[in-house]
Image (tube, rainbow, N blue to C red):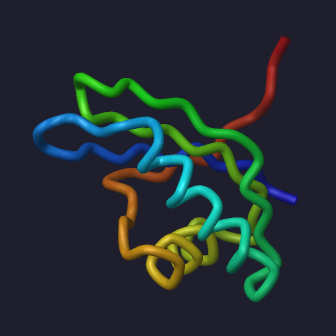
Amino acid sequence: MPLFMDVHTLDGGVAIDDVAKAHQADLDKQGDHDVRYLQYWVAEAEGKIFCLVEAPSADAASTVHREAHGLVADSVFLVQEGS
């Protein structure tokens, strides 16, 4: 399954607790689209959120965000895992 990293930018910063709630909403919705959100990182002061996701396509990953909470990423990148 392809692996994607998406990047969100929220003006004014973001609280990690709010991101945790949005991530849980993704987990609740992901099965509808054969998507698996794996991990996320937050830079609170900068308003940056990075999500690692296995999905059949970038569109499928974005659809989960859109349906779960409406916070669609600014960019989505196909990535490969390294060590």
39 up-or-down from 59: above or below: above
Q: Quadrant of residue 25?
A: bottom right
What percent of the width, then of the height, locates residue 67? Answer: 50, 84
| Residue at 26 percent of width and 35 percent of height | 47
The C terminus lies in quadrant: top right
- Residue extending farthest to the top is 83
Taking the image as shown, residue 11 lies to the left or right of residue 32, namely left
Closer to us: 45 or 56: 45
- Residue extending farthest to the front is 17
Q: Quadrant of residue 1?
A: bottom right
| Residue at 22 percent of width and 46 percent of height | 10
Taking the image as shown, residue 39 lies to the left or right of residue 61, namely right
What percent of the width, then of the height, locates residue 6? Answer: 50, 48
Q: How many marks?
A: 0
Closer to us: 40 or 59: 40
Q: Quadrant of residue 42?
A: top left
What percent of the width, then of the height, locates residue 2? Answer: 79, 55
Taking the image as shown, residue 83 lies to the left or right of residue 39, namely right
Taking the image as shown, residue 57 lies to the left or right of residue 45, namely right
19 up-or-down from 68: above or below: above
| Residue at 75 percent of width and 34 percent of height | 80
What percent of the width, then of the height, locates residue 5? Answer: 58, 43
| Residue at 55 percent of width and 75 percent of height | 59
